[in-house]
Amino acid sequence: MQVCTMDYKKLSRDGKTLPLECYGIGSFDVLSGIERYINNPDCSDKEKAAIPPGTYWIVDRPEGSFFNRLRAEAIDMAHLYRNHHAEWFALYNSQTMNDYVFVNGNRRGSFRLHPLNTDGSGVSWGCITLYRANEFHSLRRTLLSRPKVKVPGGNGLLAYGRIDVRGIPDYSKCEIK
């Protein structure tokens, strides 16, 4: 099983980059959250902010409803950036065994592991987003080449691995309301 860590204490000087360290594979530059919340665990209780600290299982991305599948396909075709939603992974929080969690009384969810678009554009709405698409595809190939494991307490949930997101948020320090 693949184990990766992302530690908010290892934030780059400009605040835009964190390392996703995947043991035996390498370290990848990532971001989490939209611009005003980017990589800030103190705001991780806000919608589209950085992913909250915790343990996340790397699992197949749920397909969703027919409408959501159609919407994702249309977005992928319109952008032509070779960043296909079907290649993304879901990140299931170990507390809920789902892709949502309650943080400071607020529901956060739809956590994903995915790249920015191949032209460098794109956003992270609380996902773990790799800056370089080629690095994402390398990580993806490695994850898919290994057998899935049963998640303890996951009612049969199978995972490629887990990501430990480290940090101690202080929600009172989030200056964005």
Image: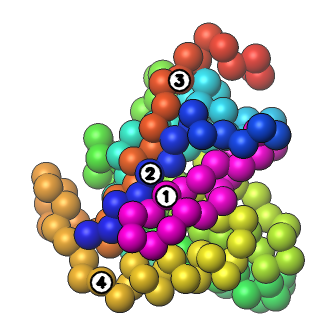
Secondary structure of the residue carrying numbered label 3: loop
Query: Which of pointers 4 and 3 lies earlier in the amino acid sequence?
Result: 4
Query: Which of pointers 3 and 1 lies earlier in the amino acid sequence?
Result: 1
Secondary structure of the residue carrying numbered label 1: strand
Give the residue number, with chain letter if any, for mark 1: 21
Task: Name the side, left or right, on which 52 lies relative to 49.
Answer: left
Give the residue number, with chain letter if any, for mark 3: 169
Q: CA distance from mark 1 to mark 4?
A: 18 Å
Look at the image and say whether residue 51 sits in the magenta stretch. no
**Residue kind at label 4, given as amino acid type:** Arg
Residue depicted at x 72% and y 65%: 131
Question: What percent of the width, then of the height, locates residue 15?
Answer: 76, 39
Assess whether mark 2 and mark 1 are in contact (beta carbons under 8 angstroms).
Answer: yes
Question: What percent of the width, then of the height, locates residue 140?
Answer: 49, 80
Query: What numbered label is drawn on residue 146?
Result: 4
Give the residue number, with chain letter if any, for mark 2: 5
Assess whether mark 3 and mark 2 are in contact (beta carbons under 8 angstroms).
Answer: no
**Residue kind at label 2, given as amino acid type:** Thr
Residue 137's image quarter? bottom right
The magenta span reads 15-35
Q: CA distance from mark 3 to mark 1?
A: 20 Å
The C terminus sits in image quarter: top right
Query: Which of pointers 2 and 4 lies earlier in the amino acid sequence?
Result: 2
Question: What percent of the width, then of the height, locates residue 159?
Answer: 29, 69
Look at the image and say whether residue 19 sits in the magenta stretch. yes
Query: Which of pointers 1 and 2 lies earlier in the amino acid sequence?
Result: 2
Query: Which of pointers 1 and 4 lies earlier in the amino acid sequence?
Result: 1
Q: CA distance from mark 1 to mark 2?
A: 5 Å
Q: CA distance from mark 2 to mark 4?
A: 18 Å
